Image (tube, grey):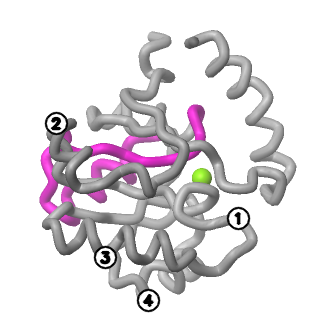
Amino acid sequence: MFHLLVPHYRVESVLELTAERLQQWDITALLLDVDCTLKRYRASGVSAEVADWLSELRRSGVGLCIVSNGRGQRIRQFADPLGLPFIAQAIKPFPLGVRAALRKIGAVPQRTALVGDQVFADVLAGRLAGVKSILVRPMHPEEEPWFTRAKRIPEQWWLKSLQ
Ligand SMILES: [Mg+2]
């Protein structure tokens, strides 16, 4: 059961997920969390580096879809300028939103990874949906609301126990 909380891969930042590396891992599509994964919690958009990274992956033919627990209006305003399809109110850690994203972009679970910063939402949702899970170090977690920061304590404990 605990394997559901173990990411397949861990990286410092999404920028490490180059097209070459994804190819090595046999990953052809990424489902992307938004807050603290693609952008800082309080920012409205992504950094220039993340925008370039997204363009590069798209050029390389990697399938991309946003999967966020955020509300539709906010996620639409984030995803539309980037030209990315999205599933909002995905209710991660439940796998329904992840499955909806797979259908939306026609991706196969075996060659898709969910990229996110939270073990108890992103890793679990990805595992339950049967995709690979890539855990990134959260961008500026000190900006998050208290209920998310509260989850960081057991999360840190769990990640330390994996080492
Ligand atoms: Mg997040």
Q: Residue at x 14, y 66 (%)?
A: 61
The three-letter code of the residue at mark 2 reads: Gln
Q: Residue at x 67, y 65 (%)?
A: 40
The answer to whether the residue labelled 4 contacts the one labelled 1, judged by CB atoms less than 8 Å apart, is no
Specify whether residue 76 is painted magenta.
Answer: no
Q: Residue at x 52, y 50 (%)?
A: 13
Would residue 115 appear left or right of 110 to someone viewing this image?
right
The answer to whether the residue labelled 3 contacts the one labelled 2, judged by CB atoms less than 8 Å apart, is no
Residue on which disc 2 sits: 110
In primary-sequence order, the first of circles 3 and 2 is: 3
Distance Cα–Cα, label 3 vs label 2: 23 Å
In primary-sequence order, the first of circles 2 and 1 is: 1
Q: Which residues are magenta?
A: 94-120
Q: Residues within 10 Å of mark 2 (few under 14, many from 20)?
A: few
The answer to whether the residue labelled 2 contacts the one labelled 4, judged by CB atoms less than 8 Å apart, is no
Q: Residues within 10 Å of mark 1 (few under 14, many from 20)?
A: some
7, 18: nearer the viewer: 18
Residue on which disc 1 sits: 41
What SS does tag 3 mark?
Answer: helix
The three-letter code of the residue at mark 3 reads: Ser
In primary-sequence order, the first of circles 4 and 1 is: 1
Residue on which disc 3 sits: 55
Q: Residue at x 32, y 64 (%)?
A: 65
Residue 57 point in image, percent of width and height: 26, 66
Q: How many marks?
A: 4
What SS does tag 2 mark?
Answer: helix
The answer to whether the residue labelled 4 contacts the one labelled 3, judged by CB atoms less than 8 Å apart, is no
